[in-house]
Structures are given as C-alpha cells and as structure tokens.
Amino acid sequence: MEKLVKSIVSSDSKGVFVEPKSSMDDGTAVSNTAMYLKYLAVAKKESDNDKVIQWLINSRSGDGSWGSTRDTVDVIDAFVSHLQWKRAKDSNYELIINLNDKKLESFNFDSGTNMDQTSKKINITELKHNDYNVIGLDKSKHRPLFKDYLYYDITFKQYYSNNLAPKDEGLAISRSFYSLNDPDSKNPLSSATMGNIVRVRFEVVVPKERKHLTIEDYIPAGMEIVDIGLATERNYLRNMEKGVKNDYLYPDFKEMRDDRAFIYKESVQPGVYHFDYYVRAATIGVYNYLPSIVSESYNPSVFGKTGSSIFEIK
C-alpha cells in the first residue's frame, strides 16, 4: 500500500501533492492531496506531513478558501484528522509575535484557549518603506517533554492597480465592449454615453478538454447588466443573441447578478469560443474594469484572466 501511495505523490516548489490520474478524474490536486494527508494521519505516518500541509496552505485562493466548496471541505476534514492525531488541542505554550525584532503581541495557548482568536492593528508608519519587514513567531514556556505544535499562515490583501496584466494558466480569455452597431466586433469601445446599451464579448481559448468551466466578469461600477429575458428590454437584443455562430459558448447555467456575470459549462472541447451579454451605461464617471476570470470550478489552478482596464461613461 505504501509503495502504491508513493508512486502517485509528486513535489514542486510549494511542497508535496497528489495529481489527478487523468483529465477525466473528478478529483483535483487539492482534494487528492487532502486525502493523502488524511491517510498519513489515520496511518500515523510522519513522512511528508509538513510538506503536504505546506502545499495545501500555499494552494489557497485569495479569499482563504481552496477554490471550490468540495476542495475546501476535503482540506478542512484532513486538517482536523491531522490535528486530532497530533493532539494539537492539548498544546500549552506562550506565542510571542514580533515585527522587525519588536514585540507586537503575545498569546497563551492551552486546552481552553486553542480556539480563541486575537487581533492586532498597527499603523503603516511602523512598517519599513522600500525594505523587508520581518515577522517573527517565538514559542516560550512550552513543555520540554511534550511536542507543542505551532501551525501558522500569513496572508496579505492588496489593492488592484489600473494596469494588471493578463495571465494564462491553461486557459486564456479576452473581453471588450462593442457598440450594438458593430455586430462583427471590429471596434472595441473605451467609453460610452450614459443611457446607451453596449455589448460585452468574451473570447475563451480552451487548448484541451476542460470540465466544470466557469467565467466570472465583474462589470464597471457605473454599469448595470441588461436582462434580455425581461419584456421591458428591447426585442432586437434577443434577436441579436439568437443570431450567433457555431463558436458560441452555450452555457449550461448563467446568472446575471448586480455586479457581475457568471457563466458555467459542464464540459468544453478544445477550441476558441465566444459569449456575449449586454450592459447599460448608467452613471457618468471613470471606472476600473477588474479582470475577468475563466477557470475549472473543481481545479482552480487551471485558469486564465484578462488584464484590468479603465472605462468611461460620458
């Protein structure tokens, strides 16, 4: 059994993980690696533990999840099994948090406080500018004959600039606004007049078969999505949507929300696909247009995103 497990384990700069067997395997690298961690905990095997946990932590999305609900649940379940094996709830020590060798905070961990949370805010002036800022974690008062485990993770939030570059990680996507008088999508728009309806067009490049494909596009703040299913909207918008070509991406599910369009397709064969929807320029202003993202829902490491841009409503 151990030889079989070792034969499917891989490693990279993030740590140790287990890849899906094939493109038809519903298991993702995240869910498979979580199962491997749980196996190590149940079998009480020390090998690879730290590197597997390191890989899983490094594979989190920006919102703290592991991409999909399924992957997130699998990882949490594996972490619980690991912590129960290591008796982490019985740890007892003082944690001291330092910033640039200066004490910021301390916290006593024991069986009654291991699930407690604490927070500390610092002024930006306390950070070094154009230099490294070093965070230190020191354990003290821990028991010499007992392994008091410390698990930690550090995440950052950042504000988007106006010039984010596109990225291709197994999928590619581009998008533009077009006038309703430009059915051939020849002249992309960078501005529109308030009250006008414009067409959003995606082009998605799929090099190989993909499953559970999703597209998410956040519209500029001064726009609103036009629901062409409503009788109050113009009939010719519905007619335009019907007059599509063979390369059109027909979604299995789509949801037009207040701030974004969400598209889902269960299975997509290799090719170049397009999808259109419509927005109305509602409020005068200059707005950031955040990147659109296409990804496999259960394998978020396969994705593509557009660059960011600016759109003006006059």
Image: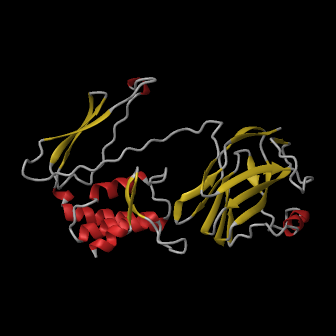
Q: Is residue 53 left or right of residue 84?
A: right
Q: Is residue 301 left or right of residue 57?
A: right
Q: How many numbered marks have been drawn onto this rendered protein structure?
A: 0
Vertical placement of residue 265 versus 134, above or below: below
Residue 144 % position (x, y): 7, 47
Residue at 49% x, 50% y: name it: 62
Residue at 11% x, 42% y: name it: 141
Q: Residue furthest left?
A: 145
Q: How is the image coloured?
A: secondary structure
Q: Is residue 164 left or right of residue 150?
A: right
Residue at 50% x, 74% y: name it: 25
In this orientation, which residue lies closer to the viewer: 145 or 88? 145
Q: State the image quarter where residue 107 is shown.
A: top left
Q: State the image quarter where residue 78 is shown.
A: bottom left
Residue 204 % position (x, y): 71, 59
Residue at 29% x, 70% y: name it: 39
Residue 10 % position (x, y): 39, 61
Vertical placement of residue 212 versus 289, above or below: below
In this orientation, which residue lies closer to the viewer: 91 or 213? 213
Vertical placement of residue 27 versus 111, above or below: below
Residue 201 % position (x, y): 78, 56
Q: Residue furthest right?
A: 181
